[in-house]
Amino acid sequence: MAQETETRERPLEAQGQERRPPALSERDLKWRQFQSRNPRFRMFLIIGVVVLLVAGFFLLRYFNSYESTDDSQIDGHLNPVSARVSGHVEKLLVNDNQYVKAGTALVQIDPRDYQVLVARAKGDYDNAVAAAKAAGVNVPITSTSTSSQLTGASAEVETAQAMLLASRQQSDAANAQLAQADANNVKAQNDLARYKQLVSKQEISQQQFDQATAAAQASSAGVDAARAGLSAAQQQIKAAQSRLVQAQANARVARTGPQQVSAMRSRAQSAEALVEQKKAELDAAQLNLQYTLVVAPVDGVVTNRTVEAGQNVQPGQELMRIINLDDIWVTANFKETQLRKMHTSQAVTISVDTTGKDYKGHVQSISGASGAITSLLPPENATGNFVKVVQRIPVKITFDAGETKEHVLRPGMSVEPKVWIR
């Protein structure tokens, strides 16, 4: 009540001064006057704020639609070219940074030593082929001859056996003839003795005695002849036995014919194997002769050439390298926190510092380990002062077809890839 009384007791001018708003600055007055004169300003202001919000939304959405890193570079195959044979470098056919096609001659090594080796191997091969042909011809000849020998030996054995049987029969006949001659001789000798007594008494004529004497002599000669025939028959038996033994020995030799044929066939096979060996040596010599001309294994640019004309090289010695510009890719080392939504086949925009151009590609694969783990000296985190550090994982990005056909990109160039994760 006291407050209301005090308010009523105040003059009206004082009350009006208390209700009046505070005085505005000149700047605020000008701003209100501008608003009152431009009624559309508020609408434009609202539209501008909306546009800014929409632009901010799309900018935020754009910056969240990709992952990028400047820790990346172009990689490629560095194909080493080395000598496969030793020798004196006769010609150097390319220069550094020269683009060559696969199969292009790079280095010529003196081929004369290898040409001599090829000629020698060719002679050895021809000699082995001739020996193999001769051994192959001997197999049927040996087979035929051994078969004939076996047949002949069998026939010879049968003939010898028949002759032995005949000789024994002749011996038996001669023995019988000898017994008969002995019997006749005994009779003739007894008759001669009786005739000798009778002729002395002149009981028989002298002629009869002479006939008895002749008969006794003839029978004695017959005994000798029969004995000689028996001896000859016995000799024929021995000869027939010897012939049978010889025929049986020949038959045993002839029965080894299959083994001889087998041995001859083995020699022919050995000769054929020798032909294969000499053929392999000839092929090796011809290959070494071809290796005297060193050619490019792939299309690319020659680099790191260390060989010079007149130099002696050894097998395995690196002569140069060829960079295959048709097979290059990008190795991007993304932070592990950037890989949450990254996967293979995602589209990539690759900005190259050297050319200032953008190239299209896609994520080919993600490495199986971080770069720190695969380094020469990997970190050991089992310590008391461990500090968590965001690791980087290599990601392989390949160019789309036709993007590198101009061959302007080189391994080692710095690039900045953008992987579109949305």
Image (spheres, rainbow, N blue to C red):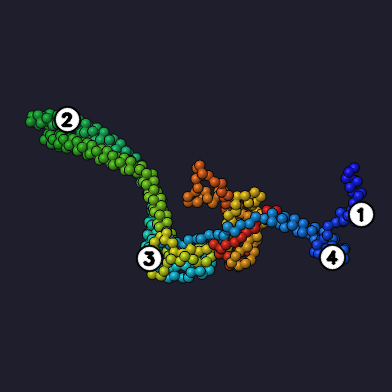
Mark 2 and mark 3: Cα distance apart in space:
115 Å
Label 2 or label 3, whichever lies nearer to me, is 3
Q: Residue at x 83, y 63 (%)?
A: 29
Residue 4 in picture, x, y percent from top left: 90, 46
- Which residue is labeled 1 in the image? 12
Q: Would you say 192 lies left or right of 353 here?
A: left
Q: Secondary structure at mark 2?
A: helix
Residue 366 in picture, x, y percent from top left: 60, 51
Disc 4 or 1, which lies upstream in sequence? 1
Q: Residue furthest left?
A: 200
Residue 174 to residue 119: above or below: above
Residue 5 to residue 45: above or below: above
Relative to the observer, which residue lies in front, 254 or 151? 254
- Which residue is labeled 4 in the image? 34
Residue 190 in picture, x, y percent from top left: 14, 29
Label 1 or label 2, whichever lies nearer to me, is 1
Q: Would you say 236 lies left or right of 40 here?
A: left
Label 4 or label 1, whichever lies nearer to me, is 1
Disc 2 or 3, which lies upstream in sequence? 2
Label 3 or label 4, whichever lies nearer to me, is 4
Q: Would you say 351 lies left or right of 149 here?
A: right
For disc 2, the neighbor class at 10 Å (few under 14, some 14 to 19, many from 20) is some
- Which residue is labeled 3 in the image? 312
Q: Residue at x 89, y 47 (%)?
A: 6
For disc 3, the neighbor class at 10 Å (few under 14, some 14 to 19, many from 20) is some
Q: Give the mark count.
A: 4
- Which residue is labeled 2 in the image? 186
Q: Secondary structure at mark 3?
A: strand
Q: Quadrant of residue 218?
A: top left
Residue 256 in picture, x, y percent from top left: 35, 43
Mark 2 and mark 4: Cα distance apart in space:
192 Å
Q: Secondary structure at mark 4?
A: helix
